Image (cartoon, helix red, strand yellow):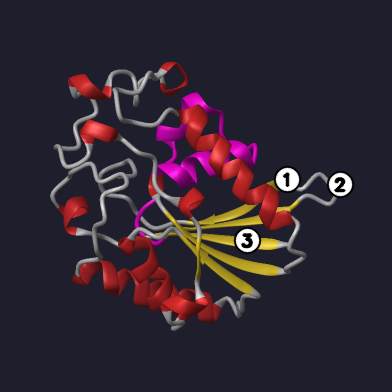
Amino acid sequence: MKVYILRHGETDYNARHLFQGQTYTHLNEQGFEQARAAKKTIKEMGLSFDRVYSSPIPRALETVETVTGLPEGEILLDDRLREMDFGPLDGTPFVKDAPLAGCLFTRPDLYVPPEGAESFDQLLQRLRSFFEDLAKTGDHSVLVGCHGCAMRCMLVLFGYLELPEIWHQGIGNCTIIEAEENRDGSGNFHVVKLHETQDPFGVFR
């Protein structure tokens, strides 16, 4: 199985450098333009998909709809693909050393989320559950619409990064992670290639 994991396009929260986490934000015009460019890239790669999944958060769903041309009813929405819940950080300026952020960026392996937020263990657990179920479908090619921090944690699941390293991997809007199921029958995946775009701020939001 090949899986193509697509980060959403730009939102006004991105442009204003705000945490958005699980906030229901929408693509701005730049985001739609990025999604249209991703559609062209996928077409040039000659890809087609047996099944298409997305986070239900609008910015991810709008990106997938634009890239595939599918209506929402033909896209499988899965809550496990939501962005990390940053709790009280959502809607605040995206500052790495903000007091509420604690060691989120400096030592994610030691991060203790504020009340109402999600831990990395919780995020990794729900992503692992998604891929375990995905491996059982027998599909050959799948598109997954997702979010920045969640995609970084997918790279941890795939053995591409260690958790303390996740913020060193810059991935911009509409970047695609190409992954493939391991041939050992374990149901695990590995990274084939990152089809990257430039992230001018050096870190997902």
Quadrant in which residue 141 is drawn: bottom right
Measured Cα–Cα span from mark 1 to mark 3: 12 Å
The image quadrant where one finds the C terminus is top left
Measured Cα–Cα span from mark 3 to mark 2: 17 Å
Q: Earlier in the sequence, mark 3 or mark 2?
A: 3
Residue sitting farthest toward the right: 184
- Residue plotted at (38% across, 62% down): 60
Residue topped by disc 2: 184
Q: Which mark is residue 3?
A: 3
Q: Amino acid at mark 3?
A: Val
74 relative to 175, above or below? below
SS at badge 2 = loop
Q: Which residues are magenta?
A: 149-174
Quadrant in which residue 40 is drawn: bottom left
Residue sitting farthest toward the top: 110
Question: In the image shown, does 39 or 144 lie closer to the viewer?
Answer: 144
Pointer 1 with pointer 2, Cβ within 8 A: yes
205 relative to 24, above or below? above
Residue topped by disc 1: 188
